[in-house]
Amino acid sequence: MRVWAAAHAVDDFYQGLVPAAVPYFVLERHFSYVGASGLALAATLGSALPQIPVGVLVDRRWLPWMAPLGMSLAGLGAGLSGLVPAYPLVFALLLLSGIGIALFHPPAGRDARRAAGGSATAMSYFAAGGSVGFFIGPALVTPALDNLGLGATALFIPPAVLMGFVLLRQHGRASHAAPVRARHQGRDRFGMVRTVQAGNVALLPALWALLACDDKYAALPLALLAGLVTNIPFAVLVKLGQDYLPSRPGTAAGVTLGLAVSAGGLLMPLLGLVAEHHGPQGAIVVLAIVPAIAVLVSAALREPARDPGPEEDPVAT
């Protein structure tokens, strides 16, 4: 699981790279707010739309090269985007990066579940790896672009290529190993569905406190709090989705790790329009309404009837 958690961190690093780089496209290339939000849309379209068909495909075929290829494309597209001058080329490269991310999540989620043996704790490490990568992205990209300009995005190509090679070797070893059988799991004490619901409820005051804050120093810890609360239900949703579809782990990973995470970016142009007319605070108002919808939707969730482990993968044996 260490390899899969690290791979997930590297892959989602490039999802974090895009929002960190967008302000520099505005500053150096003089793109408008709407144009900048269109770049986020490009990465999101690429990563969101193919997730389910890719998930269905990897549930039927082993395709050990797909996750390494996706990882490499994610890094190449995002890394080269800062080197090209024209908006259409930047858009196309970020779209390619998103497609690479879409190729990674379903097969990686399937194989991580197989390696985890049905353990919610092990899958939480895999899910947390993505969150760590998304967090590290802006932390590394921002100072690099601050000091070196947009061309510094090329510095972040090698991690994707190297991790892609590591995954190819990992698949080579895994193809000779028997699938991990489900280990006995005790009942999670709080319950997966309750954890998801609690996280959604807690996000409401976290976002509204950030919205009400008018002090730039107090806003930073409030933003950190909102980010932490957002991630409370994330790992649980990955496990829950695969428990709902135990024989289709790739499809479930494509929905929970890929489509659901990426779909929010489809609204970026709308948020860009709101920010054009009402400033960033207006966009935060819109975002603060979303958790209320999540609370209502999560109220319909039910715990799986049993705690299924990964069934033996026919495409791998």
Image: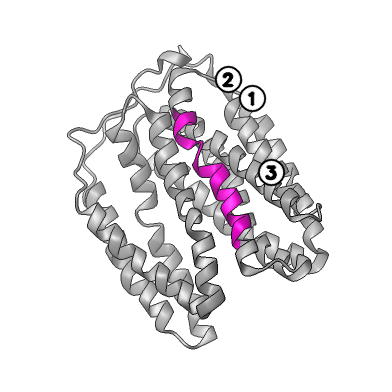
Give neighbour class at mark 2: few <14, some 14-19, many 20+ (Cα, 10 Å): few
Residue 38, quarter of the rendered image: bottom right
Q: Which residue is mark 1?
A: 169
Q: Position of residue 247 (x, y in %)?
A: 33, 24
- Residue 182, compared with residue 255, is above or below; it is above
- Residue 247, compared with residue 258, is above or below; it is above
Q: Are marks 2 and 1 in contact (CB under 8 Å)?
A: yes
- Residue flagged by tag 1: what amino acid is it? Arg
On whether residue 54 falls in the magenta region, the answer is yes
- Of helix, strand and loop, which one carries label 1? helix
- Residue 12, compared with residue 185, is above or below; it is below
Dot 1 or dot 3: first in sequence order is: 3
Magenta region, residue range? 37-55
Q: Position of residue 54 (x, y in %)?
A: 49, 30
Quadrant placement of the C terminus: top left
Disc number lying in front (1 or 3): 3
Q: Which residue is mark 3?
A: 75
Q: Position of residue 120 (x, y in %)?
A: 34, 40
- Residue flagged by tag 3: what amino acid is it? Gly
Q: Position of residue 149 (x, y in %)?
A: 80, 64
Q: Which residue is mark 2?
A: 173
Q: Residue at x 29, y 53 (%)?
A: 196
| Residue sitting nearer the eye, 14 or 57 | 57
- Residue flagged by tag 2: what amino acid is it? Arg
- Of helix, strand and loop, which one carries label 3? helix
| Residue sitting nearer the eye, 81 or 245 | 81
Left or right: 262 as drawn, with respect to 229: right
Q: Residue at x 40, y 23 (%)?
A: 180
**Residue 50 seen in the figure:** yes
- Residue 65, compared with residue 262, is above or below; it is above
**Residue 116 seen in the figure:** no
